[in-house]
């Protein structure tokens, strides 16, 4: 069975499918990942280059806006 990612899925697209992780839980998990990444960037900035923390935060804010 082919898997696909629906970037802009509507409620109708997902209504008939098996229950999945709640949105709030998913956000908490990814937020934890973002926080961990920011901690690593802060601890080893030379491994990531200038502006990487800002880029991570900008991407996270964009994801949250949808």
Image: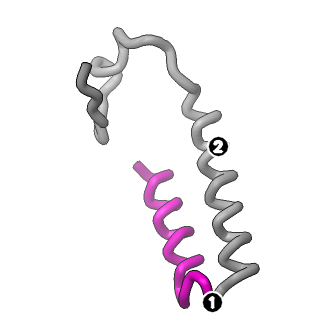
Q: Which of the numbered marks, if any, corresponds to residue 5? A: none
Q: Is residue 61 magenta?
A: yes
Quadrant into which the N terminus falls: top left
Tell me if mark 2 has few (under 14), some (14-19) or many (20+) residues whose alpha carbon lies within 10 angstroms of its own.
few
Q: Is residue 34 above or below residue 3?
A: below
Left or right of 10: which side holds 38? right
The location of residue 41, given as percent across then percent down, is 66, 77
In depth, the one of 19 and 46 nearer the eye is: 46
Q: Main secondary structure of the magenta part?
A: helix
Q: Are marks 2 and 1 in contact (CB under 8 Å)?
A: no
In the image, what residue occupies the spot 30% across and 36% down? Answer: 5
The residue tagged with tag 2: helix, strand or loop? helix
Q: Position of residue 65 (x, y in %)?
A: 45, 53
Location of residue 23 with respect to 58 vertically, above or below: above
Q: Residues within 10 Å of mark 1 (few under 14, many from 20)?
A: few
Residue 62's image quarter?
bottom left
In the image: residue 18, left or right of residue 43: left
Question: Which residue corresponds to the image point at 38% horizontal and 13% vertical from the top-left?
Answer: 17
**What residue does disc 1 label?**
46
* Residue 3 on image: x %, y %: 29, 28
20 relative to 49, above or below: above
| Chain-order first, disc 2 or disc 1 | 2
Residue at the extreme left of the image, as rendered: 2
Q: CA distance from mark 2 to mark 1?
A: 26 Å
In the image, which disc is placed on residue 29? 2
Q: Quick one: SS at disc 1?
A: helix
Judge left or right: residue 38 versus residue 13.
right
Give the magenta range: 46-66
């Amino acid at each position: 069975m082919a898997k696909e990612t629906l970037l802009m899925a509507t409620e109708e697209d997902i209504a008939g499918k098996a229950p999945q992780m709640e949105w709030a839980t998913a956000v908490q998990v990814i937020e934890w990942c973002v926080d961990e990444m920011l901690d690593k960037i802060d601890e080893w900035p030379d491994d990531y280059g200038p502006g990487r923390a800002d880029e991570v935060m900008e991407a996270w804010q964009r994801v949250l806006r949808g």
